[in-house]
Image (spheres, rainbow, N blue to C red):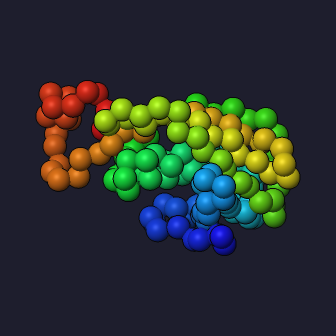
């Protein structure tokens, strides 16, 4: 299967082209490091890598919820190596556990067959039928957004 572009949100378009494909029952996500992703040391900025990690895990959670919207509740990130301009980044997410409204995801980001970033996080299913105040959300929900 070939890579499919999924950069649909305004933020994802700002970040860069996010692609996905499925191989051997494993979803993969890909981006390339471009000039706009570099810090002053000419390495991929940590904020860019965290955004890519968040997008990969968020898309995995979205698919696990049956293509329903969800938001990041928490995310932990571990930086191992750096990436440079032109490097291909491959994200491999794993769904660890799900409840009715929460999805627990782990992910490894590879470049040149080395793990450069890994992380884990929790995503919360979002009800989009009505806009509620913070007070109403706290009363109606289990603490997530």
Determine whether, in the image, residue 36 is placed left or right of residue 20: right
Residue 130, percent from left and from top: 15, 51
Front-most of residues 99 and 45:
99
Query: Residue reaching furthest front?
Result: 24
* Residue at image coords 62%, 35%: 119
Residue 8, percent from left and from top: 46, 68
The C terminus sits in image quarter? top left
* Residue at image coords 77%, 60%: 88
Q: Is residue 132 above or below residue 11?
A: above
* Residue at image coords 84%, 48%: 113
Determine whether, in the image, residue 30 is placed left or right of residue 66: right
Q: Please identify the quarter of the rendering in which residue 139 is found.
A: top left
Residue 64, percent from left and from top: 43, 47
Determine whether, in the image, residue 67 is placed left or right of residue 6: left
The answer to whether any part of residue 52 appears in the image is no
Q: Is residue 103 above or below residue 112?
A: above
Q: Please identify the quarter of the rendering in which residue 3 is found.
A: bottom right
Determine whether, in the image, residue 79 is placed left or right of residue 27: right
């Amino acid at each position: 299967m070939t890579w499919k572009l999924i950069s649909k949100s305004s933020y994802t378009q700002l970040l860069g082209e996010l692609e996905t494909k499925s191989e051997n029952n494993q979803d993969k996500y890909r981006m390339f490091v471009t000039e706009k992703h570099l810090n002053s040391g000419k390495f991929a900025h940590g904020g860019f890598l965290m955004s890519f990690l968040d997008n990969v895990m968020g898309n995995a959670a979205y698919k696990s919820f049956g293509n329903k919207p969800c938001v990041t509740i928490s995310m932990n990130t571990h930086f191992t190596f750096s990436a440079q301009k032109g490097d291909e980044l491959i994200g491999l997410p794993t769904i660890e556990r799900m409840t009715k409204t929460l999805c627990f995801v782990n992910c490894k980001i590879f470049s040149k067959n080395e793990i450069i970033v890994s992380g884990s996080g929790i995503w919360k299913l979002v009800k989009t039928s009505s806009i509620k105040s913070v007070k109403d959300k706290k009363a109606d929900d289990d603490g997530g957004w």
